[in-house]
Structures are given as C-alpha cells and as structure tokens.
Image (tube, rainbow, N blue to C red):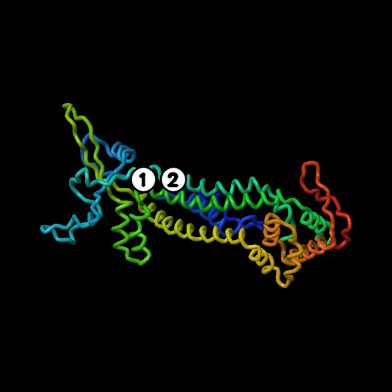
Amino acid sequence: MLEFARPLLNILQIKQVNSTDLIWRLHCRVTVYLLLLASLLLSARQYFGNPIDCVVGSGTVTASTMNEFCWIMGTYISSDPNFGNVLSSPVLDSTDLVKINAKIGHVPENERSYQKYYQWVVFILALQACMFSLPNFLWKAWEAGRLQSLCDGLTTPIVPDQWKQTRKKQLISYLVADFPRLHRTYFLRYCFCTLLNFCNVLLNIALVNVIFSGFWSNYHPAVKALLSFDFPSWSRYNSQVFPKIAKCDFHFIGPSGSKQNRDGLCLLPLNVVNEKIFAFIWVWFLALLVVSLMNLLFWVVVLCSKSFRLWLLTAPLYPIRTKVMVRALDGQGIGKWFLLFQLCRNLNPMVSRELLQSVAKAKDNGRKPYRLSKGGEPDFYTDPEGFDEEGV
C-alpha cells in the first residue's frame, strides 16, 4: 500500500560515519522524510478519492463542472465559531438531524471564511521539505567527505589490524600538522548551517501562519482538545480551519441573459488527512524550535568555554587523562578541537584514545609537521620524520 514511500527510506538509513549531530538529523532527515511522506499521501488519490465532491442538484451545471470550479475558486464556511450548532430547530427533533459542522442556508459575505489553500498544500509541504534539506545540502558540499575518509575502517567495535601499521601514521601526521585556517573554516561552516537550521524552523512557522491566516493561534484549541482526548471539541475546532463540508457559489449567465447562482454543498475528503497532518506539524515544529534553540545555546557555550570543550573530548574517552588531552590541543585553535571532536564521535573509543595519546607525545617531542601537497592539502602518504613503528 505504501510502495510510493519506498524511495524515501534511504533518508532514514543509519550511517556508520556522521558529520552531524542528533538535532541536525531531526531537521534534515526526519522532518524532511515526514514532510515528503505527507505530500505523497495527499497526492495519492487512489487512497482518499477525489479531493472535492459537490452536491448541486438538478440543473444546467454538471457535478464535474461544479467540482472543478469550487476546487479552483475555493469554498467557504461561516466564520461563526458556533456554526456547528445552527442546525438545531424547535420544530424537528435533534435525533433527526445529522450535524455536519457546516452552516446551512445563506451566509452573509462578511461572515464567510474562504478556503483557497487546497490545491497548494502538497506544494507547500514539498517546499518545506526542500527548505529543511538546504542546510544539509550546503554542509555536504562543504564537508566533501573529509570525515568519512579520516574514519574509514575505524568505526567498527573491533580495532582492525591495519590500524597498527599505516592508518595510524597517516592520522597522527594529519593531526600534528597545523592548518588553522582550514580547520577554522570547517568549524564556522558547521556553525552557520546549525544557525540556518534554527532559522529554517522560524521561517516555516511563519510560512504556515501566513498561508492559513493565523494558524498557530487558531489551531491551538483544536490541538489542545486532541491532546486532552476531547474529540467532540477537536472536531468542532479543527472544522474551522479544515472543514469537511463547505459551501460554494457558482455564478453564471442564464438563457435570458440574467445572472444566476448555483449553490453547492461540497465534501472535502482530503481535510480528514490535512487536519491530522497539520496537528502533527503544529506540535512537531514547536518541539523542533525548542530543541533547536537549546542546541544553539549549546554551541554558544562551546564557543565561549574552553574548559567545556575539553570536557566534551575527555568524558567519552575515559580513562584518558586530562593532561594528555591538554597536550594534544596545545596551541591549537577551536577548529582543530572541532575536528578532534568529530573524529571521537565516530571512531572506535580505543582508536580515539590511542590516537590522542600519540598526538600528545608527538607534541611533547616537538615533531615537525609533514609537508603539504601541491594543492595545499595534507599529504597522507608522507611519513613524518621521527615516528617509530607505533607512531609515537
């Protein structure tokens, strides 16, 4: 049934090497997947039928014409928040009525609330998915697989044999060498994309709010009723934003040249799905905004506190000594710290400890960094002078 969602599964594949954190992946992977899945669901007509179906009665206007007209021009309901109660009548018993949450009869122009967003919802969700993908696209282009090449083969629980031979010398040589501008740019680009993730949430909240005319305040009672399992109130409140039944007027010129109006009552099946999708979006975006703000504050503390940065490196590699970490970072800027932080998040902990201990010993012995290649990048295959077989 959900074969159309299979191409999206690669977004959620677990990778052995990740150059981003959990909050980042909530933005650029989970949120993108959910938005694209919602967009595909709304475009799958075979599961939900026609997006609109209007009852017009007998006359010269066909049902198909009325459906297309109302889909393009939009429908309307009464803006009265109590419109679900107008069907009560002193003449008829309430059990003879079907409450459909739509005001039957003439609705004055100044009381009408129009819905013209139906044909745009799929595109809006797809646009939001693209917006959330942008920071990840920029970071992947800037990162260019650097971390993957450094961690290749060293993320498994068992330390590979080749670590004792060639890779250890290569990584130690790369980390002992001093490239402050290169590493600082790497870190600043990551911070920029993190800030862009936070701004993305704000921008998407504003976008939904504009399209649905005050969505975050108008839909709050409906979400509150849903979370408290008050389903009658949930149905009443969400029908003001996503009505299941609405009205539509088709004005045309009759045979005698006079203006005529065909009144239609339209069923909107897609709003059964829309109401649930946007109830989830209401909660998800606000939760994402909170965790993004906390993540932003985390990186502000990282920028401001050298001791906090040292703790972030030392804590996962216990029982490594703090003075070893201090020697490994001695004279290095925040860019080199970020590179080591990225490596330690992905490498086998035993490899990380041995690597940092070797870097600290190399610093103590005053090892000179190896030469650069012609392009200015580190030459991985230049054996740094003075390293023994164990790389220390």
Label 2: how many residues lie within 10 Å, few (<14), some (14-19) or many (20+)? some
Left or right: residue 140 versus residue 27 is: right
Q: Nearer the viewer, residue 169 or 324?
A: 324
Left or right: residue 307 versus residue 74 is: right
Q: Secondary structure at mark 2?
A: helix
Which residue is pictured at 19% across the width and 44% down the height? 108
Q: Position of residue 198 (x, y in %)?
A: 51, 53
Q: Position of residue 68 (x, y in %)?
A: 32, 38
Q: Nearer the viewer, residue 27 or 323?
A: 323
Q: Which residue is mark 2?
A: 124
- The part of the image, by quadrant, that contains residue 120 is top left
- The part of the image, by quadrant, that contains residue 216 is bottom left
Q: Amino acid at mark 1?
A: Pro
Quadrant in which the C terminus is drawn: bottom right
Number of numbered discs overlaid on the protein picture: 2
Q: Which residue is mark 1?
A: 51
Q: CA distance from mark 1 to mark 2?
A: 16 Å
Q: Position of residue 386 (x, y in %)?
A: 89, 58
Residue 282 in the image: above or below residue 59: below
Q: Amino acid at mark 2?
A: Ile
- The part of the image, by quadrant, that contains residue 328 is bottom right
